[in-house]
Amino acid sequence: MENPIIIVGAGPVGLTAAEILTSQGIPVLVIEKNDSPNKEWRASTFHPGTMELLETTGLTEELLKRGLKAPVIQYRDRQTGLYAEFDATLISDETKYPFRLQCPQSTYTQVVYERLQKRTNTKVLFNSEVVQFTQDPNGVSVTVQTFGVEQTFRTPFLLGADGARSSIRKLLGLSFEGYTLEERFLLSGTPKSFEPYLPDLAYVNYISDPDEFLFILRVPEAWRLLYPIPPSVSDEEALSDESIQAGFKRALKTEDEFPIVERMIYRVHQRVAEKFHQGRVVLMGDAAHINSPLGGLGLNSGIHDAVDLSRRLIRIFSNQPQATIEEELEVYSNVRRQVALAYVRQITERNTQLMKEKDSEYRLKMQQELAKEAADPELARKWLLRAALISAVREQGIGEPPKAKQNH
């Protein structure tokens, strides 16, 4: 392949961009530091706005075969029970996909990777890392190290989809502004159903509690439980069978034991890079913005980045006259950064605060406000369209030409 676009990171965001670009005849080289595509289960929610964007690729159809439809989102209080419920069938007239689709990101990543393996214009280099790059007006020279051996590639564009600790962002010297929550979160999963323990349980549940809030989520392989770990508890202790069993028992008010099929600790960040491109080097997904998982927006907004940027690159490669390269990438950076700040951060911060607020009066006030939204069909529709990222796509656009965006 001559002068392929180089994408760093074989996770869901990088591979989505590779899928779209190669389908249009643009060659791609993917650089991945691990020995296989990203296998993390962590993210597992695909929103209606994302399924709409992926529809033309055929990936939505593949996801629907593998995922669980979750039309109902519940908000509960650990002491007083259910206080707000949003049913996405309210927006059936707005989208063909009036539900969240629950499917682990590892499944999505594998599906996309298998498609890419059948294409002659795609190459994936595993066990490889970008150690440096230099750019000029016509492209980027990228030095890649594989098992200690360095080689240099030339590319018209270098795309960094290499996660929250992005080496591409660090090599660009861009700041990653925001904060890290004090709590560590523990994610555990079991194939044993939670439904007998919590009546009328939906597949997506946010449960408020000042001491130990809970997030309960159903994916095809498991019921998942997410909760904060006290500072006094070490990672090793929190990940022990005994500790995880105790977490299940507290959450479900039972003495039953549960088979454990996943366990993971991670810190929660809300950070956005100062800009999403510098010259011909562009950031996507967690490399550009990371947020709390309480909203299921990290994976989705990253895929939206990939779709937006790919549409711009396809325009550039087809020599469409609407805009210069710099204009296209500047609009990408501005639009996607605005979505990260005005939609993703606001939604995830609100969910996190609802669940962990310690002031009882303020917690009740927030719960009552959300209950009012859920009970009013028009307010509920607005909430659902925003939570599903449909509003973000409609208001900010995806991959629109710069001049069109200026008149948006």
Image (cartoon, grey):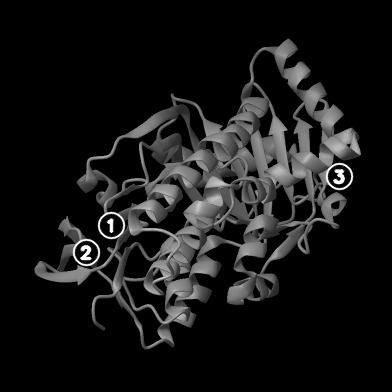
User: As shown in the figure, which amino acid type bears the numbered disc 2?
Assistant: Gly
Whether residues under marks 2 and 3 lie with C-beta atoms below 8 angstroms apart, the answer is no
What residue did someone put label 3 on? 199
Reading the chain from its start, which is encountered first: label 2 or label 3?
Answer: 2
Horizontal side of 224 relative to 134 (left or right) equals: right
Residue drawn at the location 41% of the way across and 29% of the way down: 178
Q: Quadrant of the N terminus?
A: bottom left
Q: Position of residue 385 (x, y in %)?
A: 74, 46
Residue 9 pos. (x, y %): 35, 62
Q: Give the structural element (helix, strand or loop) at label 3.
A: loop
Q: Note whether 292 is above or below 241 in the view shown.
A: above
The quadrant where residue 97 appears: bottom right
Between 176 and 318, the residue placed more toward the observer is 318
Residue 119 shows in this picture? yes
- Three-letter residue code for mark 1: Arg
The residue that appears at 17% across and 65% down in the rendered structure is 144
Residue flagged by tag 3: what amino acid is it? Pro
Circle 2 SS class: strand
The 10 Å Cα crowd at callout 2, few under 14, some 14 to 19, many 20 or more, is some
Q: Label 3 vs label 1: CA separation?
A: 53 Å
Q: Residue furthest right?
A: 376
Which residue bears the numbered disc 2?
Answer: 139
Q: Residue at x 22, y 40 (%)?
A: 173
Q: Earlier in the sequence, mark 3 or mark 1?
A: 3
